[in-house]
Image (spheres, rainbow, N blue to C red):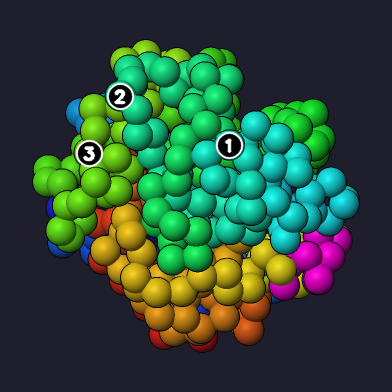
Amino acid sequence: MTTQSLAATDGPALQGHVSPGFEPVAEAFLSNWIDHDEIGAGFAVWKQGELIIDIHAGWADRKKARLWTEDTLVPVYSTGKAVAALVVAKLVDRGLLDYDAPVADYWSEFAASGKSKITVAQALSHQAGLSGIAEKMDAGDWFDSALIEDRLAHQTPLWKLGTGSGYHPVTFGFIVDALARRTDGRSVGALLREEVCGPRGIDFHVGLPESEHERAAEHAMPKQMPALGEINPIREIAFLKAWSSPGRRGASQWRMAEFPAANGHGTAAALARLMSVYADKGRLEGKRFISEHTLEALVAERVEGPDKVLPFDLSWGAGVMRNTKPGFYGPVPQTVGHSGWGGSCSFAEPVNQLSGAYVMNRQKHFLAGDPRPTRLIEALYGCL
């Protein structure tokens, strides 16, 4: 059914498509404008190769002057890590990378300061001890990838290898990008454009061309800081230093930069489509994307327990969050996914062969488990 006839009380009209039997998801989506002061958002779900839900509503800007449309692009922050992990898996599948090989085998400088034994899988599962840049720097330095890679290569880990994970909010993307360029010769953004998204017309970008900026949603920042738990030096470096995240270059420069861990832009439908690789045994649109063996290695548990940066007990694969403990992504333990700063998330599970994504521009303070997508995922499973 089309959804133009549905509207929330004192809220926007819903646009898009919902397959019969999944109408409660549309109702849950609209209730976010009533209960959570949503501005604009999109939600999409693929099931067994079919786009069963693709809905959006609201406005793309804070002043509510520009309607959210089916091609509104949304920065999804860390939700893009799950896409970057797929790019790495593609390189593993081609034999250019090995999850169990040391990062230093591909990036020799990385061996400095006691990091010679850190494997690719350990780096991707946030065990490298590089959750941020310890040395004081300018927030604009993030736009110089060579400078950041040099600092990461020579930085001493913030904790001992083998003692658990500590989420790498921004540095994850620089490690992934360094590995991609040193093996394939192209950046993560270029690989997405040339091999993954571009040929298939998938509207997801790392490094958004200026010509597409007018489609991008404007975010409303959260009104409070996330609950990080007890502040320690590791969490402070990751999130709270003046240079913890890229800044001081303006929105346009930030959108065009390639930060695979932090500034992917896309629609909900495009993100859910990419996540279908995780749900369909390594296939994308029915065609082999990565082997089942590589997919198994990608989603296998690499570390589990209390994270040193995020205030959760987590189970990490090689770049994706596994659903076994927190249950952020529904009731099925085999689900994998990722959440992004402000509330976006994507998820995929192989039992029902479902993949989905929620994107929005009203940012909240939740680090994961935002009640808006949680409500949608619960409604989705209630319809199965």
On screen, residue 148 above or below 354? above
Disc 3: CA contacts within 10 A as few (<14), some (14-19) or many (>=20)? few
On screen, residue 326 above or below 249? below
Q: Is residue 327 left or right of residue 297?
A: left
On screen, residue 306 above or below 258? below
Which of these two is toward me, 111 or 177?
111
Task: Give the x, y percent position of residue 214.
Answer: 45, 21
Task: Give the x, y percent position of residue 57.
Answer: 36, 48
Q: Given this view, does label 1 or label 3 mark the residue nearer the observer?
A: 1
Q: Given this view, does label 2 or label 3 mark the residue nearer the observer?
A: 2
Residue denoted by label 3: 240
Residue denoted by label 1: 112
Q: Residue furthest left?
A: 224
Q: Which residues are magenta?
A: 288-296
Q: Are marks 2 and 1 in contact (CB under 8 Å)?
A: no
Q: Amino acid at mark 2?
A: Lys
Q: Given this view, does label 2 or label 1 mark the residue nearer the observer?
A: 1
Disc 1: CA contacts within 10 A as few (<14), some (14-19) or many (>=20)? some
Determine the CA span between mark 1 and mark 3: 26 Å
Q: Amino acid at mark 1?
A: Ala
On screen, residue 152 above or below 139? below
Task: Give me the residue at 24% from left, 46% from top.
Answer: 233
Residue denoted by label 2: 136
Which one is earlier in the sequence, the residue at label 2 or at label 1?
Answer: 1
Q: Is residue 364 left or right of residue 23?
A: left
Is residue 58 part of the magenta span, yes or no?
A: no
Determine the CA span between mark 2 and mark 3: 12 Å
Task: Give me the residue at 58% from left, 74% from top.
Answer: 301
Is residue 291 part of the magenta span, yes or no?
A: yes
